[in-house]
Amino acid sequence: MIGVNELKSKVYFIFDGQPWVVLESNHLKMQQRRPVVQTRIQNLLNGKIIERNFQQSDTFEVADVSKKTVKFIYEHRGEYWFSDSKNPSDRFQLSKEILGDSAKFLKPNLEIDAVMFNDDVINIELPVKIEYKVKEAPPAVKGDTAQGGVKQITLEGGAVISAPLFINAGDIVRVNTETGQYVERVDKK
């Protein structure tokens, strides 16, 4: 059992009989009231994200979650197909609803961690930073810095992010998958 003080980011726990992961947590102490922990949590079975306050007296069971390395293969009509890294014939699919924002950062042959609960794959966990090839980037126009010097670029997985004006199609960039933000240019082609 864990208490509310242990509900930190990336902690897996059982709430209402289902596995959840903590995305954010903040301790809130108001005058003449009991302190609470404000959390933003995601249901690992259906991908639903909610905000919930917990009292200091609340306790939770730790979710028996394990991880294994899998490889993303392809996406077809909202179904994302993966295979076990050690056994490529062992395949499974997850829907876009379960993957949420992680889906836009998937690219073929990307190795990621699959989150398992009761021996079933229920979600994935991306590395924090991943390198992508830029598919589309509008040309930078000299003197076009009125908006802070950024433009919208499209990555090989289909994600659209903001990047500096000097990024061009064909460049390799590193992206933070948790925030969806450009980090740096890795290679210029």
Image (tube, rainbow, N blue to C red):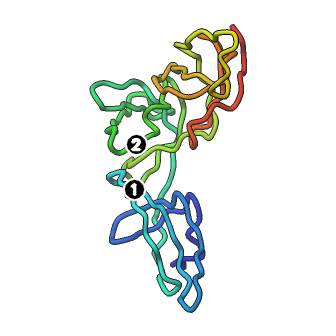
Residue for point 54% across, 32% down: 111
Amino acid carrying label 1: it is: Ile
Q: Is residue 18 left or right of residue 72?
A: left
Q: Earlier in the sequence, mark 1 or mark 2?
A: 1
**Residue 105: x, y in percent?**
50, 31
Label 1 Cα crowd, 10 Å radius (few <14 / some 14-19 / many 20+): some
Residue found at the far left of this picture: 77
Q: In the rendering, at what x and y percent does residue 108 appear? A: 47, 22
Front one among 184 and 91: 184
Visible residue check, residue 86: yes
Residue 59 drawn at (x, y percent): 48, 81
Q: Quadrant of residue 164?
A: top right
Residue 178, relative to residue 48: is it above or below? above
Label at residue 168: none
> What mark, if any, has residue 49 been given in the picture?
1
Residue under the image location 65 percent in, 24 percent down: 146
Q: Dot 2: what SS?
A: helix
Residue contact at pointers 1 and 2, CB within 8 angstroms: yes
Q: Quick check: 172 above or below 64?
A: above
Neighbours of disc 2 within 10 Å: few (<14), some (14-19), many (20+):
some
Q: Residue furthest bottom?
A: 32
Residue 142 falls left or right of residue 79? right
Is 4 in front, or is 110? Answer: 4
Relative depth, front residue between 180 and 129 = 180
Q: Residue at x 54, y 40 (%)?
A: 126
The residue where tag 2 is placed is 100
| Three-letter code, disc 2 | Gly
| Dot 1: element | strand
**CA–CA distance between discs 1 and 2?**
10 Å
Q: Position of residue 104 (x, y in %)?
A: 45, 31
